[in-house]
Amino acid sequence: MVAASDSRSFPPVRRLVPGDLKRCLALSADRGWSPEKAKWSLLLDASEPFGVDAPDGRGLAGAVVLTRWGADRTSVGMMLVAARYGRRGLGRTLMEHLIGQAGGATVTLFATDMGRPLYEKLGFLPVRRSVAFVGTFRPGRHADNSKRNFRFRAAPAAGTLAAGTAGTARFATEADMAAILAVDAAAFGADRGNIVRRLPGFAERVAVLENGTGSGAERITGYATAWRNGPSMTIIGPVIAPDAEAATRLITHLAGQVRGNIRLDLDPDRPELPRWAHAHGLEPVSRTTVMALDALSALDAHGDRTPRGTPDCLFAPISVALA
């Protein structure tokens, strides 16, 4: 029997490249994950994926992805070990390599119950909970049910864009990207531009929330995207908004365009949105724990954590692969 810590027989960890896409998809299938070609393509292009080649020559034995948010925050996603190489220390090897690559930056991740013991041994601490709500969205009577299918709409001709009312959700235009980046950075507390700039090409739809009182980019107070995760699932995330009511307007605007199931990853300890999601047909199907290595926030003079950004405006992540 091979010892649980025996990873010496594996090749060294290497940086994965876009050409490894098929190997990543095969590794996901090996663990029973749905095909996630678009997400893997995004991460192979915009993040820092690492992997270990299988000693038997059959693709990858394991993989993990590091994504940088500015200079001092990073996230972990897609941590996978092929079933035939489980319990041989490969997951720990991959995580230790990734932590070394993070270079002292805070590292965050969404941990399943299966993965949590490893992360705890590596020093990760729980930050908050997350629950996936899934189902066919049942819109209210004010939902936008038009069937237009686009990411960014073409910008209207000068003088044709009507002034928005407070909290009005609409589809984004290319001209909104600067405002989207500013809203995202203010809420998250770090620069996620390397991923956010790619969302219009990755997501099926991008929506913004206008307050109707500001001028220019100041009119945009929130945004959300809807992206496909397999043939019958659409994930809505990120969702950034000034309050829960505004968040529901963005979600409803996007969900009205979707056929099939929708997934929202929500904090159950902020019950307003989970209750709303449940009332609109989404059921809790799985849970994870958001964990962090090092502090997600600085300590004040009393030893308490001071959150970065504006966490109350963060209602859903981009993806559980991008904590």
Image (cartoon, grey):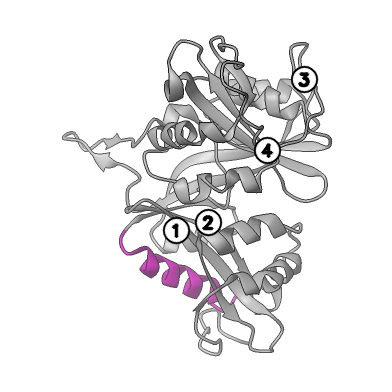
The extreme left residue here reads 301
Q: Nearer the viewer, residue 160 or 298?
A: 160
Cα separation, mark 1 vs mark 2, equals 6 Å
- 2 and 4 marks in contact (CB < 8 Å): no
Q: Give the residues in magenta.
A: 86-104
Cα separation, mark 3 vs mark 4, equals 21 Å
Q: Earlier in the sequence, mark 3 or mark 4?
A: 3
Any mark on residue 116, and which? 2
Q: Earlier in the sequence, mark 3 or mark 2?
A: 2
**Mark nearer the viewer, 3 or 2:** 3
Q: Earlier in the sequence, mark 4 or mark 1?
A: 1
Q: Earlier in the sequence, mark 1 or mark 3?
A: 1
SS assignment at label 4: loop
**Mark nearer the viewer, 2 or 4:** 4
Q: Say which amino acid is labelled 2.
A: Arg
Q: Say which amino acid is labelled 3.
A: Pro
Q: Say which amino acid is labelled 1.
A: Glu
The residue positioned 29% from the left and 35% from the top of the image is: 306
- Check disc 1 and report the residue beneath it: 120
Cα separation, mark 1 vs mark 3, equals 40 Å
- Check disc 3 and report the residue beneath it: 139
Residue 76 place in picture, x, y as percent:
50, 57
Q: Is residue 84 magenta?
A: no
In the image, is 131 to the left or to the right of 215? Answer: right
Any mark on residue 151, and which? 4
Q: Nearer the viewer, residue 241 or 271?
A: 241
Report crowding for label 4: few under 14, some 14 to 19, many 20 or more residues within 10 A (C-alpha): many
Regarding residue 239, the answer to whether it shows in the image is yes
Where is 159 relative to 7, above or below? above
Pick the quarter of the image with the N terminus.
Answer: bottom right
Residue 153 place in picture, x, y as percent:
66, 32
